[in-house]
Image (cartoon, rainbow, N blue to C red):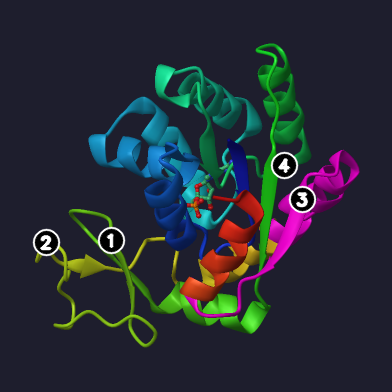
């Protein structure tokens, strides 16, 4: 099961990814998570990625394609994978297809989660993530039991550096310019389905499970 989650920042890709992984047992590959882990660890890759991420810009294609295809070459991806936040440009999608074709594989499902701009801004700027375990909350929609504290592990909740108003708005613009053309790309390939991401998380997941099957 080779799946791509597509959709603007704040569409709920991370939330749905967690549910998909739980039900289908595929590895979750988030290029954003890989970059954040590298920033935390202070690696050279992290330093290079951070300057783009802080502005809400895309990290250059060559860098992203390399880390994504390296990850996909790992043993645990042999039976399938869930890509979240990759590809984000037509160039990346072409390189991904080339990489998979060289292994006799292809993308089977592209799940395009659609949410309107106002909702996206509210979700991004209200999002709080756990510093320690990465769990995601929202000041209004998914408040933690105790303000500023993670329900799962008790660590501090913080705002992602790129979830402030200005950077979030730029990320949505970058999505419209660079990533939206992928909808056309995958429509031509005939493997994309649009999912209404404005509904409650469990309803969104029901639509996804409908597509992916039992
Ligand atoms: P995300 O966690 O998916 O929202 O990604 C956070 C940030 O990481 C993005 O705003 C980009 O700066 C960078 N990033 C993640 N994935 C990619 C990608 N496929 N191409 C370029 N930049 C990316």
Q: Is mark 3 within 8 Å of ligand 1?
A: no
Looking at the image, do the residues carrying marks 2 and 1 touch, with CB atoms under 8 Å apart? yes
Residue drawn at x 78%, y 44% is: 191
Residue at label 1?
135
Residue at label 4?
89
Residue drawn at x 36%, y 44% is: 36
Indicate the secondary structure of the residue bearing disc 2. loop
State the residue lying farthest toward the right. Answer: 188
For label 1, the crowd category at 10 Å Cα-Cα, with few meaning under 14, some 14 to 19 and many 20 or more, is some
Residue at label 2?
153
Say whether disc 1 or disc 4 marks the residue closer to the N-terminus: 4
Q: Which region shows up in magenta?
A: 175-201
**Rounded to the nearest whole Å, what is the CA distance between mark 3 and mark 2?**
37 Å
Say whether disc 4 or disc 2 marks the residue closer to the N-terminus: 4
For label 2, the crowd category at 10 Å Cα-Cα, with few meaning under 14, some 14 to 19 and many 20 or more, is few
Front disc: 3 or 2: 3
Front disc: 4 or 2: 2
Horizontal placement of 122 versus 173: left or right? Answer: left
| Label drawn at residue 101 | none
């Amino acid at each position: 099961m080779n799946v791509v989650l597509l959709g603007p920042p704040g569409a709920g890709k991370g939330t749905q990814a967690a549910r998909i992984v739980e039900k289908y047992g595929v590895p979750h590959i988030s290029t954003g998570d890989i970059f954040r882990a590298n920033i935390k660890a202070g690696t050279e890759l992290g330093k290079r990625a951070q300057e783009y991420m802080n502005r809400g810009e895309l990290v250059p294609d060559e860098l992203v394609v390399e880390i994504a295809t390296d990850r996909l070459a790992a043993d645990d991806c042999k039976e399938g994978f869930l890509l979240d936040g990759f590809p984000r440009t037509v160039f990346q999608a072409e390189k991904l297809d080339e990489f998979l074709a060289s292994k006799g594989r292809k993308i089977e499902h592209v799940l395009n989660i659609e949410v309107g701009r106002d909702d996206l801004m509210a979700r991004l700027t209200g999002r709080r993530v756990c510093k320690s375990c990465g769990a995601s909350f929202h000041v209004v929609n998914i408040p933690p039991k105790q303000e500023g504290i993670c329900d799962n592990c008790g660590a501090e909740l913080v705002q992602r550096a790129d979830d402030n108003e200005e950077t979030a708005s730029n990320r949505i613009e970058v999505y419209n310019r660079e990533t939206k053309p992928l909808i056309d790309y995958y429509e031509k390939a005939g493997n994309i389905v649009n999912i209404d991401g404005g509904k409650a998380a469990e309803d969104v997941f029901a639509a996804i499970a409908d597509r992916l099957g039992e």
